[in-house]
Image (cartoon, helix red, strand yellow):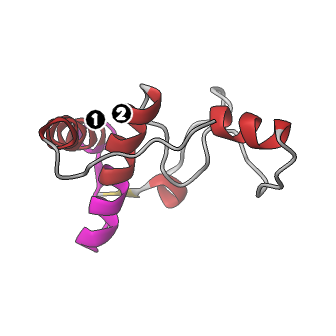
Amino acid sequence: MSIIKIDMNSDEFQAELEKTVKFTDKVISQFNWAYNPQEEINEGVQLGLARNKMMYGKRFCPCYMTRLLRKSYLKKGYVTAKFSVRRNSQQPNASRWGSKR
């Protein structure tokens, strides 16, 4: 598996980041959540979501290694941190996934 490099200054990445910011605004509004008061946290999450969208075609949570990458590492014998998967039946709660307004 080769390492994918993304130029964060490229027009392509900036366009994807703009779409991601609109996406996160929509999710925040839809679930009546609020952004973290620390702007650098929000920016880091949005940058990670945009990067994952470009690399994997999905806005995987940037907090966890994607299953695709994890499977590749496991096949090669690398040790990875425990990976937790939230099943569809589990609904995110406000205390864990964001704060209610």
Dot 1 lies on which element?
helix
Q: Is 38 on the left-hand or right-hand side of 12?
A: right
**Residue 38 quadrant:** bottom left
Magenta span? 28-46
| Front-most of residues 95 and 77 | 77
**Outermost residue toward the right in this view:** 77
Q: In this rendering, which labeled residue sits more in front, label 2 or label 1?
A: 2
Seen at 48% across and 38% down, the residue is 60
Q: Is residue 30 magenta?
A: yes
The local crowd at label 2, few if under 14, some if 14 to 19, many if 20 or more residues have their Cα within 10 Å, is some
Going 30% across and 51% down the picture, which residue do you hit? 46
Count of labels shown? 2
Vertical order, 38 against 60 (above or below): below
* Residue that badge 1 annotates: 30
Q: Label 2 belongs to which residue?
A: 54
Q: In terms of secondary structure, where does tag 2 sit?
A: helix
100 and 9: which is toward the camera: 9
The answer to whether residue 84 is magenta is no
Q: What residue type is labelled 1?
A: Gln
Q: Could you tell me if residue 60 is visible in this image? A: yes
Question: Counting residues from the N terminus, which is met first, the one under dot 2 or under dot 1?
Answer: 1
Left or right: residue 99 compared with residue 87: left
User: Dot 1: within a 10 Å radius of its alpha carbon, few (fewer than 14), some, or many (20 or more) residues?
Assistant: few
Is residue 15 found left or right of 65 in the rendered image?
A: left
Image spot of residue 26 (x, y percent): 23, 36
The percent coordinates of residue 19 (x first, y second) are 19, 34
Give the x, y percent position of residue 33.
32, 51
- Whether residue 37 is visible to the viewer of this picture, yes or no, is no
**Image location (x, y in percent) of residue 63:** 53, 55
